[in-house]
Amino acid sequence: MYQIFTKRFIDVAFSILVLPLFLFLYIIFGLLIKLDDKGRILYQADRIGKNKKLFKMYKFRSMKENAPVLFNDDGSTYNDRNDNRVTKVGKFMRETSIDEIPQILNVLKGDMSLIGPRASLSEVIETFKHDELDKMKVKPGITGFTQAYYRNGLSNREKRLKDAWYANNMNFWLDIKIFFKTIRTVLLKDGLYTNSSTRSK
């Protein structure tokens, strides 16, 4: 009942409430992004959704135009405090998670939920092991269990397993805990960087 009806109702209602904030931030950060490097305001990329369905995920663009995608040895994306692919305004947006806010458009469309597993890159779909696949039983989220409690402090394998656990144990109270934990994690910048030797603790 919660996953089918209540969760979707909460997703839509919350996203509608936040939509004016998104429009305000689009104007402010859209201008800053244009002044920084004159590129696109929104970044769109193929991500893996529920039941392996691919969709276009939206974010405020935080990297320079046509920046290459870099991976760590475990398949996770490279993420460093001093990454020269990231623009000046992009670094601020990442550290405050403002770059994630356009994903409320994905929530309204039904591709994502407010809370769920991190949406994986489409090109890694064939790398999932059998015990990791349950991650894709539910919609990916703007935030989720691994983002809130571990952020970038786990290996790619550990993140996938915990996301699979969430998909099999999702309930209203767990989502409430994740929501408030996310606020704390963002404010304290916990586990922000994967690769930097000076990453936040």
Image (cartoon, rainbow, N blue to C red):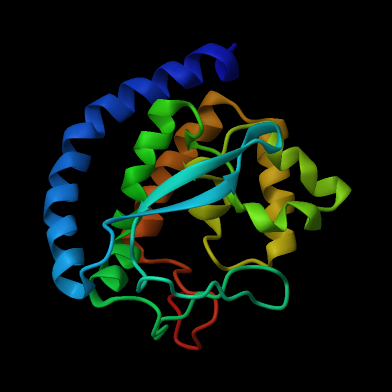
The residue drawn where x is 72% and y is 78% is 73
The answer to whether residue 153 is left or right of residue 130 is left
Q: Does any portion of residue 47 appear in the rendered image? A: yes
Spot occupied by residue 181 in the image (x, y as percentages of width and height) = 43, 48
Q: Quadrant of residue 124?
A: bottom right
Image label count: 0
The residue drawn where x is 23% and y is 33% is 19
Judging depth in this view, the residue of 150 and 105 nearest the camera is 105
Please, is residue 154 above or below residue 182 in the view?
below
Q: Which residue is outermost to the right? A: 130
Please, is residue 184 above or below residue 102 in the view?
below
Q: Does any portion of residue 118 appear in the rendered image? A: no
Spot occupied by residue 31 in the image (x, y as percentages of width and height) = 12, 60
The answer to whether residue 34 is left or right of residue 48 is left
Q: Quadrant of the N terminus?
A: top right
The residue drawn where x is 42% and y is 32% is 107
Judging depth in this view, the residue of 189 and 5 nearest the camera is 5
Please, is residue 85 above or below residue 171 in the view?
below
The answer to whether residue 19 is left or right of residue 199 is left
Please, is residue 104 above or below residue 152 in the view?
above
Spot occupied by residue 100 in the image (x, y as percentages of width and height) = 37, 51
Spot occupied by residue 135 in the image (x, y as percentages of width and height) = 70, 41
